[in-house]
Image: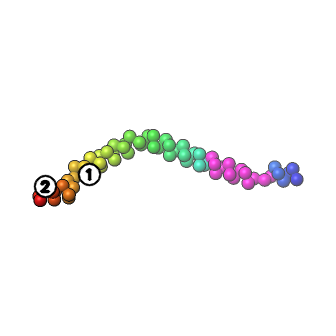
Amino acid sequence: MLRNWFRDEEGQGMVEYGLIIGLIAVVVIVALVALGPKIRDMFNDVNEKIDAIPSEGAATNAAG
């Protein structure tokens, strides 16, 4: 009975999955920290370009 308990490997698989998930989380966090400023700048550039486009409502109000 004790010998079977030591051979039981069900918990080992769960630990391995937990380690893999933890490693993936660390990689994602490092990538976001490293690329965060570049992503922010990219979104700011897109936002500025969208703000520079005149809206249809403003063109209609100015013409009417």
In what quadrant of the picture does the C terminus appear?
bottom left
Q: Which residue is mark 1?
A: 50
Question: Which residue does the image show at 52% across and 44% down from the upper left?
Answer: 27
Residue stretch rendered in magenta on the structure: 7-19
Residue 19, position in %: x, y?
63, 46
Q: Nearer the viewer, residue 52 or 16?
A: 52
Q: Residues within 10 Å of mark 1 (few under 14, many from 20)?
A: few
Q: Nearer the viewer, residue 10 or 48?
A: 48
Gap in angstroms between the C-alphas marked 2 and 1: 19 Å
Q: Is residue 62 left or right of residue 48?
A: left
Instruction: Give residue 44's quadrant in the image.
Output: top left
* Residue kind at label 1, given as amino acid type: Ile
Q: Is residue 18 left or right of residue 28?
A: right
Instruction: Describe the element under mark 1 as helix, strand or loop.
Output: helix
- Judged by its main secondary structure, the magenta piece is helix
Decide which of tag 2 and tag 1 comes sooner along the chain: 1
Q: Nearer the viewer, residue 14 or 48?
A: 48
Res. 62 mark: 2
Q: Residues within 10 Å of mark 2 (few under 14, many from 20)?
A: few
